[in-house]
Image (spheres, rainbow, N blue to C red):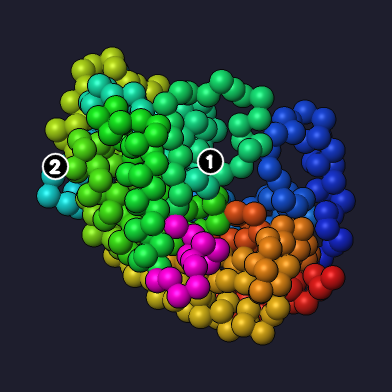
Amino acid sequence: MSIERQTPLIKTELPGPVAKTYLERDEHYISPSYTRSYPLVVKHGDGMMVEDVDGNIFLDFAAGIAVTSTGHRHPKVVEAIKKGLDEGIIHMSGTDFYYPSQADLAERLAKAAGGKREKRVFFSNSGTESIECALKLARWHTKRTNFISMRGAFHGRTFGAMSVGNSKARHRSWFGPLVPGVHHVPFPNVYRDLAPGQKPEELAEQCLRYIHDVTFKREVEPDQVAAIIVEPVQGEGGYLVPPPNFLPGLHEICADNGILLIVDEVQAGMGRTGKLFAHHHFNVEPDIIATAKGIASGMPLGATIAAADIMQWPSGTHASTFGGNPLSCRAALVTLDMLQSELIANSARMGEYLLGKLKERASSHPKIGDVRGLGLMIAAECVADKTSKKPAGKLRDRIIDEAFKRGLALIGCGESCVRFCPALSVRKEHIDTAVDIFGQALDASKE
């Protein structure tokens, strides 16, 4: 079954009658902790489009939170999974046994990560698990216990990942005490933190000096820090792109003090920013890379890629029953083929096109304060007005809801940002439709 049309089609009120029955069951049986933005009950996906249980068709610019990197059910991914079912095996734990797809993918990722050092890979099921692996590995290798992380960061919801995260207070409420030894420092927000006359690079230097002048002097000595963990582009924090000297500055601090640099590429990686990994934009070689989301086109998979001289921990130190599942690895191999042959380049081209179209649309709107991003990782920030820059979260939510009513699936990030993270296979006609609907939603959301 395929969805022939490439534009939205809304046939019923939303939610439709069939969707309402599932929403009722969901409310009764499923944990209320999930963060649903609107009542989209999906039945089928094909490329850039999804169809709900009532036959309404939506243009998907959320991509499963930046996960379906090649689009929904790409034929090559489907073929790889079917071949794995027909010729291979559904599960054989890579913790205890060996299978070709896991070794094949590890070699591909280790080489694709780049840099001068050889790499090794640990496979898990998700981004949070890849972060947990990175944190454990950093402590094991350095024999140090402290971490430095960024304000506004999101790294996941398990205890270790939640402890280094700093995105929303709700993520931490009633879950303490958290993992000790985490110290949060400023991440440069060029839109909000830049002083009059200040250059972005100067703001980055200011944030880097904080580590020396405050963290190392008042909180923890550098020889007690195992790692600094950073998103090359902050995701849930608002799709914040740092100035070009920020990551190199962190790398220098790490190198000077025997601290490991962990980059969280869970959302920004796998081609989303127009390079395989977002840190490639900044010409740094981290010690550990954590990735997931778009790695296997929707199949559950995470990977922690580390310098081989760091990933030397002995058997039994860290493991995962389902991590690196054979079918997920097969999907990831095909995904990586498509990323490297065409989709990373398409992400760069289409990202530039989308950024330009959104900036053009936002320039005349008084409540879109900023449009920013790299590749197909783009956000439009809603504000009360462009002078005060006060976040307008309720307005953002109305815009997303109005877009949904018109057949465009979007999600938010930060306090008041609309997030645009479509599949890397997106075309200009999809972008034109999305920006047009976004404009209609803006107009319909006026106070």
Q: Which residues are magenta?
A: 188-199
Q: Which callout, 2 or 1, points to the residue nearer the camera?
A: 1
Residue placed at 28% from the left, 42% from the top? 261
Residue 196 painted magenta: yes
Label 1 neighbour load within 10 Å: few <14, some 14-19, many 20+: many
- Residue holding disc 1: 166
Camera-side residue of 346 and 185 = 185
Check whether the beta carbons of the residues at disc 2 and disc 1 lie within 8 A of each other: no
Camera-side residue of 13 and 31 = 31
Residue placed at 37% from the left, 65% from the top? 202
Q: Secondary structure at mark 1?
A: loop
Q: Secondary structure at mark 2?
A: loop
Left or right: residue 105 versus residue 215 is left
Where is residue 75? Give x, y as percent. 45, 57
Find residue 264 and report its image quarter. Answer: top left
Residue 298 visible to an observer of this rendering: no
Quadrant of the image for the N terminus? bottom right
- Residue holding disc 2: 118
Camera-side residue of 18 and 153 = 153
Residue placed at 25% from the left, 21% from the top? 143
Q: Amino acid at mark 1?
A: Asn
Where is residue 430? Give x, y as percent. 57, 74
Name the dominant secondary structure of the magenta segment.
Answer: loop
Where is residue 38? Give x, y as percent. 75, 52
Residue 189 painted magenta: yes
Where is residue 115? Give x, y as percent. 17, 51
Position above or below: 413 against 266: below
Q: Amino acid at mark 2?
A: Glu
Label 2 neighbour load within 10 Å: few <14, some 14-19, many 20+: few
Position above or below: 60 against 104: below
Quadrant of the image for the C terminus? bottom right
Sequence-wise, the earlier of marks 2 and 1 is 2
